[in-house]
Image (tube, rainbow, N blue to C red):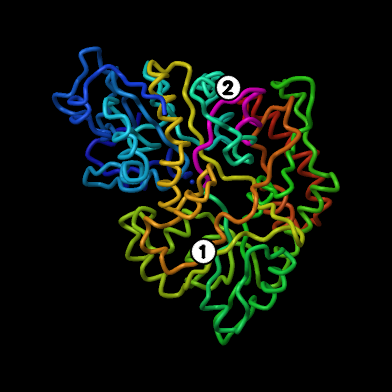
Amino acid sequence: MSDSKGMSRRGFVRNSALIGGLAALGGALPGTAAAAATSSTSAVPRAGARSAAGTVEIPNRYNKPFSVDDDELFIFAANFKPFELGGDDEGREATRYFDTVFGDAIRAKFPNVRIKYATWDYPIRYEDIARTTRVPDLILEDPRTRIDRDLEPRGWVTDMTAMVQQAGIDLSALNPGTVEQVKSRSDGGLYGVPVFIDEHVLLYNKLIFDRFRVRYPRVGSTYDDIYKTARALTRNDGIDHYKGFMQHPDNYLALNQLGLYPFVPGASEQPAPEDVKVNLTSVEWKRVADNMYRFLMLPGNTFTTVDDFFKGDMSFPGHVAMAVHTLSKLNAYALNDLYIEQDDVEDYTEWAKSVKIGVTSMPVLSRGSTAIYQPNTRAAFIPPQSAHKEAALGIVKYLVSEEIQTRLSSYGVKAVLPTDTVVNAFGTALPELQGIDTSGVYWGDNAVVTNYQNTEYWDIPLYKVFRQHVLIDGMDVASSLHVAEQVDIPNYIKAQAAAGLTW
């Protein structure tokens, strides 16, 4: 462990080479309402609040005291940036977003449950937890990439099908794309329950559209429509250069709108690495890739980062007309402080002077289609080692109830329970969104992944297709897909397997 005693978190991150590469059941725990009143989501051990049953200390790279009492329900969240915001060098912890959007409501609903909350990576990470005997009772995580990367290798997932039935959770009422996405990573079962979506939408800068007298994009716009608009708005104006459209090509393939799954079904849900086969060269995959290729080849529209919509790598803020980005970024660009790190507020406020935000649904592949991306889901998992499964399951059931789904939607994330009440609540708790038309956020249908049975998911290097072979090597689409399928991905799987990894 690195010795970071006396060093701030930000200082440690700046100076550590290890980090430098960094992106309702009424179940209750033992205890009383009075005990709950003294509990906290703080990551700092609370003086005088030790459980008689015992306490587990979790050492960490920041040398920050962190412990979990046996009678606390331990919730750990990861891979949703707003969860990490709010911690700073003066000792405030990254609990602000969780408390506001989730924690306060959970504590009110379950007053006898003592909640202990932490988020990756401050002060603890998965590897810190794994070195102890105290596994989280509930994990909020990205099922698409992290079941196989973080949870399954540690034995922290189990088939929750029977638990979901026991709790009376109606999966059929939830967004089908989110349910199938979890199932596609669950080896024939159901490892988690979807909770919310950090949906991808089309952001556009009205200042650029107004300057050049171009009509704003609308719900249901096709990629053909957006390409024409991108051509019109990729232009010079004096010394200013504007790009028409940014969309991350890796996400575009991984979350593709046809629900294509790159792995070829075999004879087992857990094939040996040498038996894992992929298909990126079908007619459907080529159709998807050809659609993106034209945007990447548009002169002057060089792909950099979708963050350039606000201020990323380009020299000046507000010089990208349109970008497919997430709702959490919309909320940050609108300057809501739940979605911005405190140290970044001054910069965001300055950059916002160059952007007047519009938002609508992301483009579709053909006229009349309603298929948007496969969902950018966050799901709830109950590890089999949890000593508080009943209470954790009660919380999971609450998280997909209309009550809490309405709350989540009001705070600017897309809910998985799309009732009228939930949909109409979107953004109502964020004053900064009140002047922005967000009616397109729930438009369309998340693509549903298909043909995933008898496969094993690997986090394959899809970036090779566009960012390596097209943008660097200068290949055409057919060649880039072929090389990725026949060379890059097999070599990646072989190397990961040789290192003892399964992702």
Q: CA distance from mark 1 to mark 2?
A: 45 Å
x and y percentages locating residue 311 in the rendered image:
47, 66
x 68%, y 46%: residue: 447
Residue drawn at x 60%, y 33% is 182
Task: Give the answer, above or below, for where 193 lies relative to 471.
Answer: above
Q: Is residue 444 above or below residue 497?
A: below
Which stretch did the figure color magenta? 181-197
Residue 294 horizontal/vertical position (percent) = 75, 64
Kind of residue at disc 1? Asp
x, y percentage for residue 408? 43, 46
Find disc 2 in the rendering and name its residue: 161
Pair 1/2: label in front: 2
The amino acid pointed to by label 2 is Thr
In this view, which residue lies farthest toward the right? 283
In the picture of the structure, the residue carrying the numbered disc 1 is 313
| Left or right position of 409 against 45 | right
Give neighbour class at mark 1: few <14, some 14-19, many 20+ (Cα, 10 Å): few
